[in-house]
Amino acid sequence: MNRVRYNFFIFIVIFLFIVAIIKAFDISIVKHNQYSKKYFSNIVKVVYSKGKRGSIYGRKNSLFALDYCVYDFFVDPKYYIDNMLYYRNKEDTIYIKRTEKFMNKVSELLNIKPSDIKSIIEKNKNKRFVILKKGVKADIFKEMSELFMPRSFGFVKRFERYYPDGEYSSHNIGFCFANGKGAEGIERYYDNYLKPEVRKENIPLDLYKYRFSNKPDDGYDIYLTLNRDIQDFVHMRLKKTIEKHEADGGIVIVMNPKDGSIIAMDSYPFYDNNNYKNYKYNQIRNRAVADVFEPGSVFKLITMSAALDSGIFKGDEIVYCENGSWKIKNKVIHDVHKYKWLSFDKVFVYSSNIGSAKIALELGRKTFYQYLNRFGFGSKTGIDTISESKGIVKDMFGIGDVDLATMAFGQGISITAIQLAKSYSVIANGGYAVKPHFLDTVKYYGKISYVYKIHRKRILNDSTVKKVKDILKKVVEQGTGKRAMLKHYVVAGKTGTAQVPKKGSYETSKYVASFAGFAPFDNPKIVIVVSIFNPKKNGFYGGSVAAPLFKEIAKFSLNYLAVKKDK
């Protein structure tokens, strides 16, 4: 009997041993991947960590956008309940009292009642992570970190975006969505540079489940050509002009004509990119690049340039201006003042629509369109921001004499303000079309990784540029642009007063008042475009509404940049 029992015992041991071997073989060989994953999931947590988004700087390292740390205060409800049960069973009143004291301090600092915290914990008792308060500032975080904090509570560090210049430069800089992705302006256009690394990691946990991970890389820093001081001055003066004339909108661009760099750009209506959710897109879009409008007489720059550069006009011709009224087919063209014979330059100095129309008709549509294309109308400038419009230019083969005549003085063609700034830069820089741009350099952890390359192409010859510059100077000294004149700098430019189109005709009481020009005359450092939309009070002409704003901005900018006086 004992022998039988002994043999049975040996059999059981051998059997269990064989089962163990088979099970071990099954775990280590057959189902290795399955059990490895299960084990791995217990000791490793998959997390997504993100670095800091790149900052945006202007000239003199002025900050336009940066990330700053905030903290989300959280609780692990399941751990809290288990932990409190454990200390109650131990009758550890000290720990329980310290926990209650901590909750009272949370109530004081974060404005969350202890009863509300307990209610949230109870409602989520099986969850392991519930955020109690988002966006805790660094000073509060520091104070709370110095307190006794029960291990079921903690903070998650993250970044929020802040724009120090706010509405003063919001149309240029744009903003980010809540997820950190660029949504508008520079933030969106250069998102691939600015966005930080997002790292998916398998993070080993220690005995207490503390995380140990590598810091993901931050985004690249962007350095712009914007001058914050000039930008802010432009903003304040544009606001003042809008209020003075009770206008519906306004645009100002300040640009370096030599390389196309944007020194300042602003448009009204304004918005604050720190609180972008409070605004409609109508207020958010950058009108300087997105909105098209009929420019009026500032567009005569193209007519005079085409006439002289093509060689069809030499600049010494006399044009009959029909005493202020001229009918061409079914269209009557008017001048504000009645002129009979005007020299070529006086046609533009006194801003004669009739004279401009006759010059364009003499050029013909082929030559006129050749210069429209050279200056870039009907095409995007390629400026490095989003939502740029290419304007509206009628098909050359679908226009007649009336269309050509009216385009000569900026009617029947729609352009953007940035296209206008680019056009006046051609005259200011000696005949070169330059690509407007915001970007200067890109840096990665302080080291330059990219420098913007200037794009220039000659489109006018030197003699044309000289003649056009002289005409634009006379516009300011003798003609419609006298209110743009500066005491210590010679200014050249052109006024424009355009009617606003409506279906089949034009509004009788809505205008766009513009002035575009540059200074100093001999060696221009800035081109400025000003357009004010539908001024309803204190005048509506470009010479009385836009030219004074040009003058203020030019005076400030030239003095700020320490440009040598030329008169």
Image: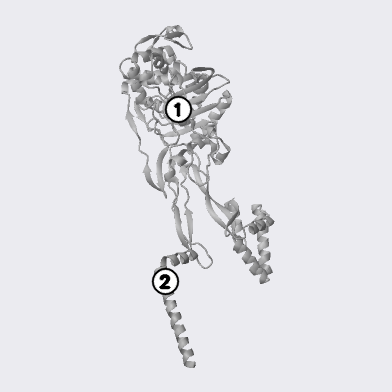
Which is nearer the eye, 550 or 281?
A: 281
Residue 169 visible here:
no
Residue at the (46%, 83%) spot, across then down: 12
The x, y position of residue 9, in whole percent, is 47, 86
Compared with 343, 425 (above or below) is below
**Mark drawn on residue 502:** none
Q: Is residue 361 left or right of residue 138?
A: left
**Which amino acid type is marked by label 1?**
Ala
> Could you tell me if residue 191 is visible in this image?
yes
> What sort of colour scheme is used for the picture?
one colour
The tag on residue 26 is 2
For badge 2, the amino acid type reads: Asp
User: Residue 536 at x, y = what percent?
Assistant: 57, 21
Distance of mark 2 from mark 1, alpha carbons?
Answer: 74 Å
Which of pointers 2 and 1 indicates the residue nearer the eye? 2
Seen from the viewer's position, the closer of residues 540 and 229 is: 540
Q: Residue 7's image quarter? A: bottom left
Within-10-Å neighbours for mark 1: few <14, some 14–19, many 20+: many
**x, y percent for residue 290:** 46, 31
Give the secondary structure at mark 2: helix
Q: Earlier in the sequence, mark 2 or mark 1?
A: 2
Q: Is residue 549 left or right of residue 92?
A: left
513 up-or-down from 284: above or below: above
Q: Which residue is mark 1?
A: 417
Residue visible at 47% across and 90% down?
Answer: 4
Q: Secondary structure at mark 1?
A: helix
Q: 132 above or below 549?
A: below
Residue 430 horizontal/vertical position (percent): 34, 26
Could you classify mark 2 by the number of other residues whose Cα lies within 10 Å: few (under 14), some (14-19), or many (20 or more)? few
